[in-house]
Amino acid sequence: MSTEIIPVVPPRERGWHNLPLVKQLHQSVGLQRGMLITGLVLVAIFALVALCAPILAPYSYSALSGPDGDFGSLTAPSAAHPLGTTIAGYDVLSRVIWGARTAFLVIVIAVVNSIFAGTMLGLLSGYVGGALDRVLVMIADAIYAFPSLLLAIVLSIVISGGQSSLWGGIWAASLSITVVFIPQYFRVVRSEVVRVKSEAFVESARVVGASRGRIMFRHVLRNSTRSLPLVFTLNASEAILTLAGLGFLGFGIEPNSAAEWGYDLNKAIADVTNGVWWTSVWPGLAIVLVVMGLTLTGESLNDLADPRLRSRRKAKAGSGVVAATAPTTTEKGERDE
């Protein structure tokens, strides 16, 4: 009696190909993959420029002169200033590059703080329930119903107060945007917590005597935050637009505190009527490209997270292959004969 030896396939090692983003990139097909790759490339360029701003920028964001003297006002694009200068005498290229760092810092501070606060409040509200849940839901709905840009303006004025350069700069803008985003994460996490806390594995944890804190954080929270990365990518683009809106309306970051694209657009309004285009085109283009990259990434990941849309795309992509390889009626009849 011969014994057949079945080779043992070693388990797949963990690596970069097992990352969730890489898996979703492999799952995407056709136009969806093109949109996701385009968004990721734009986001990667934005992050790289933000992190390497001191190296890439030829001058500081507040510099008005260089080794050759003053930059001059509204200087046309040249070898010394590839994107020209503003009416105040700032180098446009340097302001655009440093503006990427400002936007990146605002996204990190605002969205990370709102994720933490919204997640904790949503977990507490959904798990405890009762009067606490009703009060928190009412407050979140009231904030969510308020116009986001107007709320950010009011909070920016209250937080900055025109006293401290720290609070009047990036932190004031970031914290004002944080409050705007907290209700969104609160709603997402609370709805998931209400669903998860009635699952069988949570009841089993209660039966075996697990503490409330262990159930909340180890069992309920871990299974209630899977959609937060999708909300993060969508809120990041909204944070850019809110920051630009604050700067454009004059409630954002002062030019001597940091470079900000919305502020530069506000100061370029008069230049457009005088035929000076370079002070407004480049900050506006930077906003459009970054928001487009974040939006494409967020929408693509949102579609890939839906099993119905994913299976529908795979079926459409595979229909052409099936149609090309499936035998026709005539071919089947000839083989049968």
Image: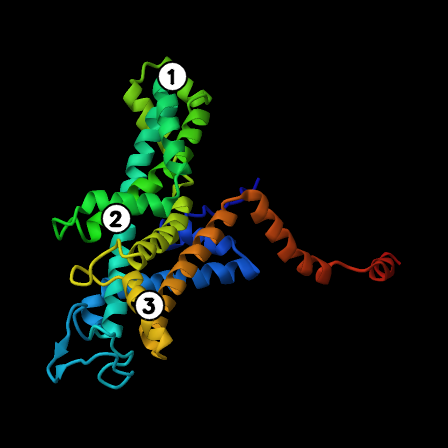
- SS class, disc 2: helix
Q: Amino acid at mark 1?
A: Gly
Q: Nearer the viewer, mark 3 or mark 1?
A: 3
Q: Amino acid at mark 3?
A: Pro
Residue assigned mark 3: 283
Mark 2 vs mark 3, CA separation in Å:
20 Å
Task: Please tell me which of labels 3 and 1 falls first in the chain.
Answer: 1
Q: What crowding class fits label 3: few (fewer than 14 Cα within 10 Å), some (14-19), or many (20 or more)?
A: many
* Front residue of 91 and 301: 91
Q: What crowding class fits label 2: few (fewer than 14 Cα within 10 Å), some (14-19), or many (20 or more)?
A: many
Mark 3 vs mark 1, CA separation in Å:
49 Å
Residue assigned mark 1: 130
Task: Please tell me which of labels 1 and 2 falls first in the chain.
Answer: 1
- SS class, disc 3: helix
- SS class, disc 1: helix
Q: What crowding class fits label 1: few (fewer than 14 Cα within 10 Å), some (14-19), or many (20 or more)?
A: few
Tell me the tag on residue 174.
2
**At which x and y percent is residue 129?**
38, 19
* Front residue of 71 and 31: 71
**At which x and y percent is residue 155?**
26, 43
Q: Residue at x 30, y 31 (%)?
A: 120
Task: Please tell me which of labels 2 and 3 falls first in the chain.
Answer: 2
**At which x and y percent is residue 273?**
37, 75
Does residue 123 appear to the left or right of 255 in the view shown? right
**At which x and y percent is residue 134?**
39, 22
Q: Quadrant of the N terminus?
A: top right
Q: Amino acid at mark 2?
A: Ser
